[in-house]
Image: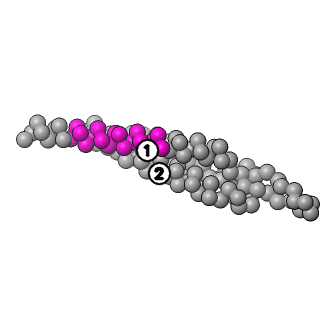
Amino acid sequence: MVGLGSALESAISGIVAQSTRLSVSAHNVANMQTDEFRASRTVLEAKGGGGVEARVETVDARGPTIVEPNGERREASNVSLEYEIGQQILAEHGLRASVRTLRVISESLGSILDLHV
């Protein structure tokens, strides 16, 4: 049962981490047209006992400088739509893997209960 417990913890932490990644990416995309907006990134780190933890960091890089027709300069956001699409695809795959793990755990527990009845 210890193996199923750690698998369950791993699957749940994976869902939480990938949900964080998806939320951060959606926030970045929603604000990509906001001048001087700084994107955030989700950093995933393995936990000692299994599973994953998500940490959110702000990207310090400046956005491109836009020169207006009147000569005024402004800084655009530093959000890269290409990068964000990639993050959303990774989050989808990570969520699918974690949900699959939960299904396998559920099936395994059902088999164990069938043996004890």
Disc 1: which residue: 95
Describe residue 63's horizontal placement relative to residue 111 as left or right. right
Residue furthest left in the image: 117
In the image, what residue occupies the spot 68% across and 51% down? 79
Would you say the residues marked 1 and 2 are in contact, meaning their CB atoms lie under 8 Å apart? Answer: yes
Image mark for residue 27: none
Q: Which residues are magenta?
A: 92-109
Q: Amino acid at mark 2?
A: Ser
Question: 18 or 50: which is nearer to us?
Answer: 18
Q: Main secondary structure of the magenta part?
A: helix
User: Image quarter for residue 110?
Assistant: top left
Sort mark 1 into few (<14), some (14-19) or many (20+) by Cα contacts within 10 Å. Answer: many
Q: Is residue 99 magenta?
A: yes
Q: Do we see residue 55 in this rendering?
A: no
Disc 2: which residue: 19
Quadrant in the picture for the C terminus? top left
Residue furthest right in the image: 71
Question: 98 or 96: which is nearer to us?
Answer: 96
Quadrant in the picture for the N terminus? top left
Q: Position of residue 12 (x, y in %)?
A: 37, 47
In the image, what residue occupies the spot 47% across and 51% down? 19
Describe residue 42's horizontal placement relative to residue 104 as left or right. right
Q: Position of residue 22 (x, y in %)?
A: 52, 50
In the image, what residue occupies the spot 74% across and 59% down? 36
